[in-house]
Image (cartoon, helix red, strand yellow):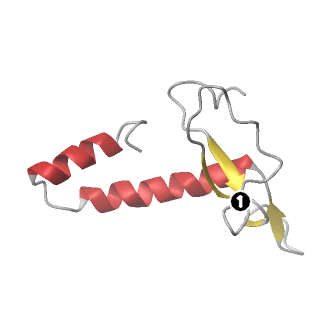
């Protein structure tokens, strides 16, 4: 499905709390060797509803969680010394394939 199939996009699927992919995910593409996923089932949401908590499921909340994980990793790597070995890893992480 577009835009997840676009080569510059990291496709993220939703899982339950045990890491199992859920049925709401798109099928694995023919060219996909590996698929990535994170929590996407019953995620507490900041959706505007003051009377009760709202939980969201799907690839959209999973993508937001994955983006947060990526941001934390990039921030951590940015705080480390720039010796040659770590610099190579750090530079790769800023690219789609490295992430």
Q: What element carries label 1?
A: loop
- Residue found 43% across the figure and 55% down from its top: 71
Residue 74 sits above or below residue 98 on the image: below
The quadrant in which residue 28 appears is top right
- Residue found 50% across the figure and 28% down from its top: 8
The tally of labels here is 1
x%, y% of residue 34? 56, 41
Residue furthest out toward the left? 83
> In front here: 93 or 56?
93
Residue 15 sits above or below residue 32 on the image: below
Looking at the rendering, in which quadrant would you find the N terminus? top right
Residue 61 sits above or below residue 55 on the image: above
Looking at the rendering, in which quadrant would you find the C terminus? top left
Q: Where is mark 1, residue-wise?
A: 20
Classify residue 39 as left or right of residue 23: left
The quadrant in which residue 65 appears is bottom right
x%, y% of residue 49? 85, 66
Q: How crowded is mark 1: few (under 14 residues within 10 Å), some or many (20 or more)?
A: few
The quadrant in which residue 96 appears is top left
- Residue found 75% across the figure and 36% down from its top: 27
Classify residue 2 as left or right of residue 54: left
Residue 74 sits above or below residue 30 on the image: below
> In front here: 15 or 81?
15
x%, y% of residue 43? 74, 65
> In front here: 61 or 13?
13
x%, y% of residue 6? 58, 24
Classify residue 47 as left or right of residue 9: right
């Amino acid at each position: 499905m577009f835009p997840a199939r676009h080569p510059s996009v990291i496709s993220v699927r939703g899982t339950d709390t045990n890491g199992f992919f859920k049925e709401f995910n798109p099928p694995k593409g023919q060219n996909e060797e590996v698929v990535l996923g994170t929590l996407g089932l019953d995620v507490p949401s900041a959706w505007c509803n003051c009377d009760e908590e709202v939980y969201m499921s799907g690839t959209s909340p999973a993508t937001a969680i994955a983006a947060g994980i990526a941001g934390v990793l990039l921030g951590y790597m940015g705080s480390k010394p720039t010796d040659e070995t770590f610099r190579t890893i750090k530079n790769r992480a800023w690219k789609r394939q490295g992430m």
